[in-house]
Image (spheres, rainbow, N blue to C red):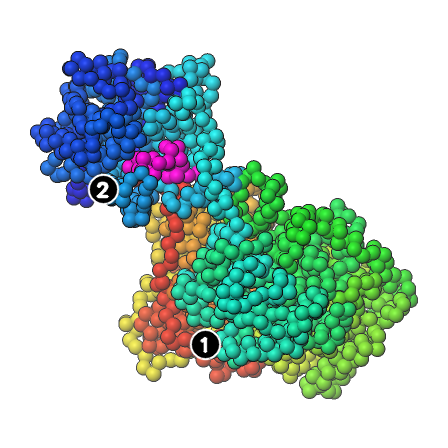
């Protein structure tokens, strides 16, 4: 009976969850025992079926067997009928209506007659209706058995089988109707099915036939049905016609739709088109998933003439895409099969038979249990579980569990059990699928498409960030193509070609200029060709910038020109074209110009490359090399030009040292000489690194230059730029160490996490950075193919074909020489390279500091110190900005503890550009750090890759290797002792001499003297270099009463860049001897702006003097002082380098990894060229004035004490000193307001907070543009609504006390806002605390950080937001740290750790090696909790907007931008004070960048960092924030008094301690936070009313309502240019409304299991 929709019930949703079993005699010997064993199986699977409401009506059960010919023959003979021989008749059972069955039978007979067949017998099946349930009996059909034979006895067996299927299909389509019940269980010459709406124990009782001992079979498949989401019925019982199914087909709708769609295309060699049409639809109406599957199996085996095993693996393939162990043949087969049929996917075990084969197959996930046994009597038993068949263990010869995707099979004709690998090996070799599929270019396409997740899409979801392919020139293809147009190509190698990106309007001009350049270089263009593309296939954004892509073919003007000369001139042509043709008015970019290689690329995604470029689809396009690349743009906007591959390589990663590398390449240009090119020709190539290059493009430029102009082999060029971590590897060979050491004298590493694939047409390979931070897997096959990719699963390779596989190791190279036809192992190629030159001999030229000291005059430190004044009277200290705080909090801890000093609670002091206390120039610079696009390095756990060693002094000619490159001074670390400094001043080794440039000037020159003195220093340095000085020492030792010191950083920057501009920088070492530098940040700034070494003489002298005065405890020796200082500073410098992912000091030097905040353009351009300084600020006059003020404080004749007693409170608030946001007045006012809920007290707090803000913050330098007419505050959005935008910051349980943590959570839950768990996990009792949501102590935001402390599935599932901590505002680039004394049993249990053991995370998300990894983590977290919003926490720095755009492309729903001034429980002062930027810059940049990229409406933006007042919140919103994070302010309301003792566990008010006694002092209440937030919200409402804004969302992004302050409290603030920060797009809509592309949850195994569980629960609920 056909099931119909009833109310909300729809049979289209029917699913089966059942029990199955089979018994088979492998020899094909029939017996009644097989049937009895099947009965036993079925009865014992009773629990796998279900019963209806009367408990006696099963959901369905039955058995499929071979036709019992002897039984039927005997039975029918008794009634006077004679059956033909087996196979010459077909039979089957029909379910008909008791009243209308004659009509149905008549229609069936008529159809049979039309198909040249006849019914010879109708038989009523004897049944026992009294044994079944009431519900089943009410729908019980009349069960009739039909016997059919060919009308013509001479009809072939094949024809008979063909027509039988037609009869079965036509009958099912045409006989059944609402008025006529008709269902045929099977119609076959081999099989018959007995089934019904029965339970397992009723089948043999109900069907009389089955009990007859004459009923013999060699096959029996049984099934017990548990129907879910459906009504049971007789028709839906199983087995079906060829199979029985336990499970679900989750993809059913799509499978059925696609089968329906194919019906118009299918043609058969067996059936005519009309016959096929009469069978359609293949999947009959109202089929369950099992029935639909059975329909398709029938169709494939009969109409498709596939064997039953092949049909099954077509529909239920293994998980072949990501199985590296699978054979290439099998992968090829499955891949071919996938082109014609998608998997019918879902948890399923399917037993099947066609009379010959009997077996079972398990889905690719293995979600249905199935056990099997093979016995000595040659019987196979299989069932959904063990214990359903009685088998003597002694009889078992094989048993097991069917594995995912595997097949169990018996061939009863051959009498064989056929293992899975045997039958599949047979099937996969039926057709030459590997030949059909296996081409290098196609494999490259497959790789690229499968790396879709490693690229990104723009705002239109169809414009990729870039993708492409680099191949060998397909000569035959081009030759054939151009011949059709009447052109003839020269032989391969005698022409060059490349693709150009030109403008559709001006391309003729660009081509003309190119032809002119070619002519000048004795070459000519023979062909221009427009590349055929499919523009309609790419995204809107990409199409708006789509170039005209033209291909050029170039040949020598003189056919006799040598190949070497041709190659030489081609590079000249490529470089000159790039330098001279492109302009603002003329688009020109050449992807490549080569005799060997060609690049096809664009602003595409991975699936578009082969669709867009018509050439790539042509079967004549053949290549032996293919490099593919998928780009995820984060630090640059996507563009056609920036897509990769580049000319020689494709790059996955970051070059963190780029600025320094580029600067040094520029500096070398004046020194380089080539045996291949003349000086004029070299000059015409400069700059080597072209303008506006990405890091990848810059690297590619240098590789080109080294291989062509430098005539180095490509492998040598790569290891020159990306050397191994050789400095600390004791296992490395001496020859290799010598080579790398020699190489380091001429080229610093291009350092950062990177895997680079490369080729020049001969060599093809890849190299991994020294840290190994980019995954890369490779396979070498017997067919001599090499495959390498960013991950496994992107290429289909037969495991049997693999002779070598592995993961590229840090610093190692993968290489193939296609000329010699060899795979070249890393050790072989490097051994060859390192022995090319006698580097060990050349290294004897190296100068060491020991040699310098040995040849220097003696220097008596004790005598020197004796001449100095006592520390308190030493005027140099205030002149250089020292104070008591500097000595006690920074210098002394470094020397005593051999590490940097620690602090806590963040930085709430003014920016240097707003400070009134004459900050040093160092304070204007903020360290950059890695976030998202590449990981910070862990400088302690990964110490082996870190090196502070560096050669200094004049470099040799990069293009001519030789011993001259080793004549440099090798320093193991950059700090010099007093002895070493004095020795270098008097150096006299060979032609080495030094020159001193004074970094001071007469005080009488006043402010105006500074710039002219910089000129003087630059000129003196240049003159010294030209006169042969090898070391230039910039020294401020002459500074004193009459001479003012110039900032060492300013002087160094000016000289460094001046020497670069005059091409002299690589000819000298720049050493800074300064009394100014004394902490890690100072040293890093000096190194970052070009210092080769630093002597911080004043620090050493102070410490020596303190020892003499008895004030240094313990009284260290001079050697110990220096060693301890070196240890502390080395750790600190390494830590700062590691924040940016840089591992070698040689690469860090000159890399300028900083942003200036509040420094004028004139200063930056002169001294720090290339450093971002986006808001302008202090000019030379201001900086000179601050230096003069320090000088005056030191030496002025005035009454009073000039001793070093000042403490300006740079680190901790001091009365009368530097302003702090959290000063005692602010703290007191806030606590009074929060505790008393007093509007008056809150107004006092706002007044004091805003006054402080003007002295400390960028937002304090802004004014609001009030509306001409304020609106009534009653019209403004309610406070209760506004507070829902608030969140507390990520403060972990452990950094703060349990009382504080729970109070924060309870308060935020009460007001509908969110608290943040921090990275320390949360106790289970809190995770489950949801009984009263407004009183819950569960944190709504759950943070995930590198340490993964406390992160469990329960933790994630109980989150509303899951926040990925990529960086922390107070210490970006550093990991969290919880001292052991704060790890109590309670904390350890929560974090799954050990009490008393300190917990130190690696740098935030050290496991996020790239933007693609972040996308994967977001996907995983969304899968863990689909309801949660995934948030990514970033810290403000230059470029954070572009990073945020990448995060948005990763499908994060929320982004936090933290300011540099956030709080922390523990961090070094270097990190707290000098890393990160104000949030105002970060949120403005992020909002603007997302607007430009049309991504703003994908995400919600949150900002945090010392937010206090409604004005702070409103300004944050106007700059682009939707939500707001508060950390310190809520803690203050709970009692925090900013003692900054968090890291010591001694918080006196119980807020940030785990000490049980101190925790008793905690007096905070949820009401205190609630009061504060509602007072804050009311203040916001009042501001909105004055602005004329009713809805808070209407504030977001309205930067036009901001203006620079007209009356700044600090004159320095007037120099700030905040125009860019408050730029506004009035047409932009920042509301996060754009619908994200859905996460494919359904594709995940756990999603399927969860959904199945939900359905079962619903079914259980509905039945209950």
Q: Is residue 309 magenta?
A: yes
- Residue at x-position 16% and y-position 24%: 122
Q: Residues under labels 1 and 2: Cα distance?
A: 68 Å
Chief secondary structure of the magenta span?
A: helix
Residue 1445 vs residue 249: left or right?
right
Q: How many marks?
A: 2
Q: Quadrant of residue 1525?
A: bottom left
> Which label lies toward us, 1 or 2?
2
Along the viewing direction, whichever of 291 and 915 lies nearer the viewer: 291
Figure check: 574 above or below 408: below
Figure check: 217 above or below 815: above
Secondary structure at numbered mark 2: helix
Q: Earlier in the sequence, mark 1 or mark 2?
A: 2
Along the viewing direction, whichever of 1639 and 1184 lies nearer the viewer: 1639
Regarding residue 144, the answer to whether it shows in the image is: yes
Task: Give the residue pinned by disc 1.
Answer: 1623
Q: Quadrant of residue 556?
A: bottom right
- Residue at x-position 47% and y-position 53%: 449
Task: Give the residue pinned by disc 2.
Answer: 278
- Residue at x-position 52% and y-position 61%: 480
Which mark, by number, is residue 1281? none
Quadrant for the N terminus in the image: top left
Along the viewing direction, whichever of 578 and 1458 lies nearer the viewer: 578
Magenta-tinted stretch:
293-318
- The outermost residue toward the left is 99
């Amino acid at each position: 009976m056909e099931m119909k929709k009833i109310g909300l019930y729809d049979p289209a949703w029917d699913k089966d969850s059942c029990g199955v079993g089979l018994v088979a005699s492998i020899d094909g010997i029939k017996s009644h025992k097989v049937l009895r064993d099947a009965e036993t199986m079925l009865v014992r699977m009773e629990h796998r079926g279900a019963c209806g409401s009367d408990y006696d009506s099963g959901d369905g059960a039955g058995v499929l067997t071979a036709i019992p010919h002897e039984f039927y023959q005997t039975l029918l003979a008794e009634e006077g009928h004679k059956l033909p021989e087996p196979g010459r008749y077909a039979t089957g059972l029909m379910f008909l209506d008791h009243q209308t069955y004659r009509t149905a039978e008549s229609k069936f007979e008529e159809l049979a007659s039309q198909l040249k067949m006849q019914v010879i017998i109708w038989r009523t099946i004897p049944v026992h209706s009294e044994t079944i349930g009431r519900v089943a009996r009410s729908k019980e059909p009349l069960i009739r058995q039909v016997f059919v034979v060919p009308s013509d006895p001479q009809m072939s067996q094949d024809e008979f089988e063909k027509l039988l299927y037609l009869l079965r299909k036509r009958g099912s389509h045409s006989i059944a109707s609402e008025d006529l019940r008709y269902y045929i269980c099977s119609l076959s010459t081999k099989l018959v099915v007995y089934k019904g709406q029965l339970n397992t124990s009723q089948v043999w009782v109900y069907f009389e036939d089955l009990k007859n001992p004459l009923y013999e079979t060699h096959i029996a498949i049984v099934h017990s049905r548990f129907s879910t989401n459906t009504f049971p019925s007789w028709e839906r019982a199983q087995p079906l016609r060829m199979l029985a199914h336990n499970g679900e087909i989750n993809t059913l709708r799509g499978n059925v739709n696609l089968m329906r769609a194919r019906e118009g295309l299918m043609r058969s060699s067996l059936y005519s088109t009309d016959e096929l049409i009469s069978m359609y639809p293949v999947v009959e109406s109202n089929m369950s998933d099992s029935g639909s599957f059975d329909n398709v199996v029938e169709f494939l085996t009969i109409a498709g003439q596939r064997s039953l095993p092949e049909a099954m693996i077509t529909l239920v393939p293994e998980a072949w895409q990501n199985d590296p162990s699978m054979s290439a043949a099998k992968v090829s087969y499955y891949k071919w099969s996938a082109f014609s049929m998608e998997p019918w996917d879902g948890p399923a075990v399917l037993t099947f038979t066609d009379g010959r084969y009997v077996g079972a197959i398990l889905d690719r996930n293995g979600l249905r249990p199935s056990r099997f046994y093979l016995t000595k009597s040659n019987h196979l038993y299989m069932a959904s579980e063990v214990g359903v068949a009685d088998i003597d263990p002694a009889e078992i010869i094989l048993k097991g569990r069917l594995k995912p995707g595997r097949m169990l099979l018996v061939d009863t004709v051959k009498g064989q059990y056929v293992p899975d690998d045997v039958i599949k090996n047979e099937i996969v070799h039926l057709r030459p699928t590997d030949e059909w599929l296996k081409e290098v270019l196609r494999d490259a396409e497959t790789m690229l498409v499968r790396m879709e997740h490693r690229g990104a899409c723009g705002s239109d979801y169809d414009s990729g960030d870039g993708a492409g392919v680099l191949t060998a020139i397909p000569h035959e293809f081009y030759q054939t193509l151009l011949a059709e147009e009447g052109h003839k190509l020269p032989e391969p190698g005698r022409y060059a070609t490349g693709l150009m990106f030109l403008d559709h309007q001006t391309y003729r001009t660009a081509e003309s200029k190119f032809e002119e350049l070619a002519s000048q270089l004795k070459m000519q263009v023979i062909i221009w060709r427009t590349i055929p593309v499919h523009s309609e296939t790419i995204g809107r954004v990409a199409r708006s910038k789509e170039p005209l892509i033209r291909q050029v073919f170039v040949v020598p003007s003189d056919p006799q020109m040598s190949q070497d000369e041709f190659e030489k001139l081609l590079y000249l042509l490529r470089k000159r074209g790039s330098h001279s043709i492109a302009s603002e008015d003329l688009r020109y970019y050449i992807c490549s110009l080569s005799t060997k290689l060609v690049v096809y690329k664009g602003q595409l995604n991975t699936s578009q490359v082969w669709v867009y470029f018509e050439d790539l689809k042509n079967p004549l396009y053949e290549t032996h090399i293919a490099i593919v690349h998928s780009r995820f743009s984060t630090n640059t906007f996507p563009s056609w030009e920036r897509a990769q591959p580049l000319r020689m390589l494709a790059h996955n990663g970051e070059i963190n040292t780029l600025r320094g590398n580029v600067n040094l390449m520029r500096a070398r240009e004046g020194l380089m000489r080539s045996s291949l090119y003349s000086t004029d020709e070299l000059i015409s190539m400069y700059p080597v690194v072209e303008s506006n290059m990405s890091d990848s493009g810059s690297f590619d430029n240098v590789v080109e230059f080294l291989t062509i102009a430098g005539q180095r082999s490509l492998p040598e060029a790569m290891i020159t730029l990306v050397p191994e971590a050789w400095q600390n590897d004791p296992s490395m060979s001496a020859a290799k160490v010598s080579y790398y050491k020699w190489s380091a004298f001429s080229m610093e590493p291009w350092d950062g996490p990177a895997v680079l694939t490369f080729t020049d047409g001969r060599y093809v390979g890849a190299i991994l950075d020294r840290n190994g931070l980019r995954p890369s897997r490779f396979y070498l096959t017997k067919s001599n193919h090499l495959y390498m990719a960013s991950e496994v699963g992107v290429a289909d390779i037969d495991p049997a074909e693999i002779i070598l596989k592995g993961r590229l190791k840090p610093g190692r190279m993968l290489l193939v020489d296609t000329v010699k036809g060899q795979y070249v192992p890393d050790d072989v190629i490097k051994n060859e390279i390192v022995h090319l030159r006698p580097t060990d001999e050349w290294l004897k030229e190296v100068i060491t500091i020991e040699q310098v000291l040995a040849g220097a005059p003696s220097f008596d430190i004790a005598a020197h110190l004796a001449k100095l004044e006592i520390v308190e009277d030493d005027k140099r200290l205030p002149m250089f900005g020292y104070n008591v705080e500097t000595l006690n909090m920074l210098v002394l801890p470094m020397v005593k503890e051999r590490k940097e000093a620690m602090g806590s609670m963040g930085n709430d002091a003014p920016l240097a550009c707003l400070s009134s206390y004459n900050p040093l120039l160092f304070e204007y610079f903020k360290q950059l750090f890695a976030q998202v696009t590449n990981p910070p390095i862990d400088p302690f756990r990964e110490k082996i890759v870190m090196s502070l060693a560096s050669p200094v002094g004049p470099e040799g000619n990069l293009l001519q290797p030789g011993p001259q490159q080793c004549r440099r001074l090798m320093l193991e670390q950059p700090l010099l002792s007093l002895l070493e400094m004095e020795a270098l001043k008097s150096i006299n080794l060979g032609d080495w001499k030094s020159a001193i440039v004074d970094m001071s000037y007469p005080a009488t020159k006043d402010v105006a003297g500074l710039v002219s003195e910089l000129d003087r220093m630059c000129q003196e340095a240049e003159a010294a270099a030209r006169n042969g000085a090898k070391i230039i020492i910039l020294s401020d030792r002459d500074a004193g009463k009459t001479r003012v010191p110039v900032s060492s950083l300013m002087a160094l920057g000016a000289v460094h860049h001046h020497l670069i501009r005059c091409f002299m920088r690589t000819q000298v070492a720049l050493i800074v001897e300064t009394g100014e530098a004394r902490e890690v940040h100072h040293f890093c700034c000096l190194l970052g702006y070009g210092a080769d070494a630093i002597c911080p003489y004043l620090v050493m002298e102070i410490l020596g003097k303190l020892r003499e005065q008895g004030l240094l405890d313990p009284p260290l020796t001079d050697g110990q002082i220096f060693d301890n200082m070196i240890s502390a500073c080395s750790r600190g410098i390494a830590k700062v380098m590691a924040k940016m992912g840089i591992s070698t000091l040689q690469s860090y030097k000159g890399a300028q990894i900083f942003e200036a905040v509040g420094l004028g353009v004139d200063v930056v351009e002169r001294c720090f060229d290339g450093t971002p300084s986006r808001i302008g600020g202090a000019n030379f006059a201001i900086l000179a004035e601050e230096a003069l003020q320090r000088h005056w404080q030191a030496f002025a004749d005035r009454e009073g004490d000039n001793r070093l007693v000042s403490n300006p409170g740079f680190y901790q608030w001091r009365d009368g000193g530097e302003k702090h946001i959290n000063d005692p007045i602010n703290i007191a006012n806030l606590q009074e307001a929060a505790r008393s809920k007093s509007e008056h007290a809150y107004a006092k707090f706002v007044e004091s907070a805003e006054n402080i803000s003007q002295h400390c913050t960028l937002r304090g330098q802004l004014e609001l543009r009030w509306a001409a007419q304020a609106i009534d505050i009653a019209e403004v959005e309610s406070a209760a609504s506004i507070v829902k935008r608030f969140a507390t910051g990520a403060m972990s349980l452990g950094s703060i006390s349990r009382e504080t943590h729970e109070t924060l959570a309870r308060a935020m839950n009460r007001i509908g806002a969110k608290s943040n768990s921090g990275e320390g996990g949360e106790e289970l009792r809190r995770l489950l605390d949801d009984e009263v949501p407004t009183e819950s102590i569960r944190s709504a935001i759950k943070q995930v950080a590198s340490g993964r402390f406390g992160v469990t599935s329960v933790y994630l599932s109980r989150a509303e937001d899951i926040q990925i901590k990529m960086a922390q505002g107070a210490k970006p680039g550093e990991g969290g740290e919880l001292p052991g004394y704060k790890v109590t049993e309670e904390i350890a249990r929560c974090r799954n750790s050990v009490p008393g053991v300190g917990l130190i995370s690696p740098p935030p998300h050290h496991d996020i090696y790239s933007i693609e990894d972040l996308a994967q983590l977001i996907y995983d977290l969304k899968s863990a909790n689909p309801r949660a919003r995934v948030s990514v926490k970033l810290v403000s720095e230059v470029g954070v907007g572009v990073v945020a755009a990448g995060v948005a492309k990763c499908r994060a729903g929320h982004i936090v931008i933290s300011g540099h001034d956030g709080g922390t429980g523990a961090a070094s002062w270097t990190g707290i004070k000098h890393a990160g930027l104000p949030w105002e810059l970060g949120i403005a940049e992020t909002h603007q960048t997302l607007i430009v990229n049309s991504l703003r409406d994908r995400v919600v933006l949150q900002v945090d960092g010392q937010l206090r007042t409604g004005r702070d919140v409103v300004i944050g919103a106007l700059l682009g924030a939707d939500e707001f994070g508060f950390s310190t302010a809520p803690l203050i309301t709970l009692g925090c008094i900013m003692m900054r003792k968090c890291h010591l566990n001694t918080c006196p008010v119980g807020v940030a301690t785990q000490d049980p006694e101190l925790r008793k002092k905690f007096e905070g209440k949820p009401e205190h936070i609630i009061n504060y937030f509602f007072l804050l919200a009311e203040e916001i409402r009042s501001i909105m009313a004055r602005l004329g804004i009713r809805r808070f969302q209407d504030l977001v992004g309205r930067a036009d309502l901001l203006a620079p302050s007209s009356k700044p409290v600090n004159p320095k603030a007037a120099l700030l240019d905040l125009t860019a920060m408050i730029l506004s797009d009035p047409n932009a809509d920042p509301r996060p409304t754009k619908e994200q592309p859905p996460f494919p949850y359904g594709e995940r195994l756990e999603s399927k299991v969860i959904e199945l569980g939900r359905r079962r629960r619903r079914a259980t609920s509905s039945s209950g």
